[in-house]
Amino acid sequence: MSDQTPDKPGSPGGPGSPDSTDKMPENVPAPTGEVGQVGVRQGMFGVSGTGDTSGYGGLVSAVTFPAPAQRPFGGWFDEVADALETATRAAGLEHALGDVVIHRGEITFHVRREDIGAVARVLRDDPALRFEFCSSVSGVHYPDDTGRELHVVYHLGSMTWNRRIRVEVTAPDSDPHVPTVSDTYPAADWHERETWDMFGIVFDGHPALTRILMPDDWPGHPQRKDYPLGGIPVEYKGGTVPPPDQRRSYN
Amino acid sequence: MSTDQDMYAGASETTEGRVFTVTGQDWDAISEGLAEEAEERVVVNMGPQHPSTHGVLRLILELEGETVTDARCGIGYLHTGIEKNMEFRTWTQGVTFCTRMDYLSPFYNEATYVLGVERLLDIEDDVPEKAQVMRVLLMELNRLSSHLVAIATGGMEIGALTVMTVGFRERELVLDLFELITGLRMNHAFIRPGGVAQDLPVGALEEIRSFIALMKKRLPEYASLCNANPIFKARLEGVGHLDLEGCTALGLTGPVLRSTGYPWDLRKTQPYCGYEDYEFDVQTWDTADAYGRFRVRLAEMWESLRIVEQAADRLAGLEGAPVMVADKKIGWPSQLSIGSDGMGNSLDHIKHIMGESMEALIHHFKLVTEGFRVPAGQAYVPVESPRGELGAHVVSDGGTRPFRAHFRDPSFHNLQATSVMSEGGQVADVIVAIASIDPVMGGVDR
């Protein structure tokens, strides 16, 4: 149903249309694998195995996220990227910065996870950056993004420059550790606790990483994609309504 | 009532010391019990069910006499998993969920989510002007009703019951307008990706105008009741102090930040929904305390009235203009009308899809069953809610449902300032400090 044309090469095409498989040039996974294909969508109704009698079961389309941008980024994006590169190099963090993604007018810096604490300090304190406002920290779970299933997304704002950026780090499911930024942004405290609570990401160095929304003795981390969902018992000839992630639905 | 008769009000010994459980009216048990102990330090667990904690907020206070030495919040009692739920509904249905988060400012929840979805769809410039003006109108009316509740409940918590009654009296008028325009007093799900759900009903503009006229008479009542009231000032002045450095370090936004004198307002600094076209001023105060926050809210209500007035004037010239994006693959198809059997799809629309246009029928069917697909990516479009920066981090994997929606709720964020605002003060001032943040637990816990 999506016939919109991509605004520029490298941006995702209409992932929904049946013909937008990974053959189309705009859907070719990003070369570095940094923000490339993170999965494959099959069929149309979220059903696997038998049960899909719709005739759409053979559809295969790649799930691709916006690819890394190339210089020049345009506008103030270049200034921030330059300042960040200079400042991280001065702080001895040569390899901290990864890809830069620009999508829909928002810029995302991918940062190596072991450096996020130091990079946050640079982002806040460097006079050319001055991202003094950590607006939110949130997690995203991409179960198909092998080796980097867990993403932590920081939304930073600069009141001095009136700018906004997004910083993203990834961690594998097998080692869900990310350094804390709460020593730089004290208010990231609760956001990191929430991300731990919901995704099981451990923020090393956090002063008191405990559950915040779920009860203290709750098992599991509810917003992970593999968290089991409950069905609804229906008393009609033993029938049950399956959990929402196993129902027939568009995907 | 003696403690051995009340099963809920007993005393027991633990390794941490003696524990008293009281539920009100039986405070004598504590004071008698404490008289025997030599210890001055008492840990009070206030809430989660307590009328003056603004909902189900739990406060853990460490006291020495009347002085609070440590204050911590316990939250999560109203967690309903809205973000997770949204992952199993279409993009349009997501509005129905997120409107329920911060129940005092539903339009802001909807707006920030919808703006994020529209950015991912790349239709930000295609949303019709009338839809944007209606969003602004509803959001500013909502700011009025939310600030009225903030002032009303804040007054109630310090014993000013008249402030409470007049505050809710005026809020009722705003809710009547919401009911007229959206059909519901709360949880509207009215702002939709691509526009708003419906056009303005007949007679709405006249109602809004008479409301504005009435509010211009009523708002000064708050000023004359509170602004120079010695009891009100004695309770609020210098309480919950947090200066600009503190606010910036903790990332506080909204009236708390503006009460330090810093005019940071996203409607001015990073405009959305066409806020750059309206004339209004960012209100600040310079005392950085609970009284300053009260004055900021009071002044902001006047500014909201100004914006509502301008929006109503613009709407008068936009009669019959579309309120939903023209793209038939995104714009919700239904045109509701009131029939003899209640509200439902308008007969004209039924006639159109059933008898005239097969494409319209297909679009209707596809949108209602499948929804629309949103290109993969992530967006964050914050709005200035009555409590500060409210933003939705919307992630799509190209499917018909949100891959992840995370809300940065200002109450959640600002509540972290409870400790610095209330430690070193008196127990009674904790209530005032928290009321001045104006947290709404539905938004905090989501």
Image (tube, rainbow, N blue to C red):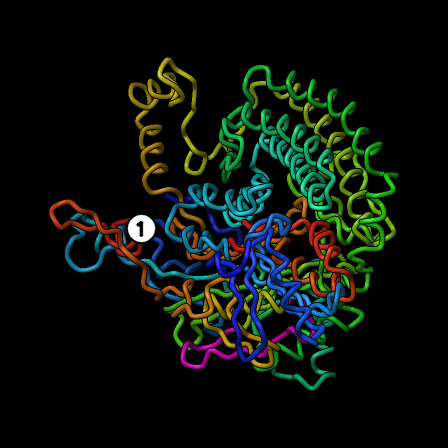
Q: Position of residue B271 (x, y in %)?
A: 70, 44
Residue wearing tag 1:
A18
Residue B364 figure quarter: top left
Q: Amino acid at mark 1?
A: Pro
Return the residue nearer the eye: A237 or B56. B56
Circle 1: element type: loop
Magenta span includes B262: no
Query: How many numbered marks does the figure carry?
Result: 1
Q: Position of residue A115 (x, y in %)?
A: 61, 81
Q: Is residue A37 visible?
A: no
Magenta span includes A185: yes
Q: Is residue B327 visible?
A: yes
Return the residue nearer the eye: B25 or B256. B25
- The residue that appears at 76% across and 41% down in the rendered structure is B297
- Disc 1 crowd rating (10 Å Cα; few below 14, some 14-19, many 20+) is some
Q: Is residue B17 left or right of residue B81?
A: right
The part of the chain drawn in magenta is A170-187
- The residue that appears at 70% across and 79% down in the rendered structure is A88
Q: Is residue A59 left or right of residue A85?
A: left
Return the residue nearer the eye: B336 or A197. A197
- The residue that appears at 81% across and 49% down in the rendered structure is B236
- The residue that appears at 51% across and 53% down in the rendered structure is B446
Q: Position of residue B437 (x, y in %)?
A: 70, 52
Instruction: Please report, as a chain letter, where disc 1 is located.
Output: A
Report the magenta stretch's main SS.
loop
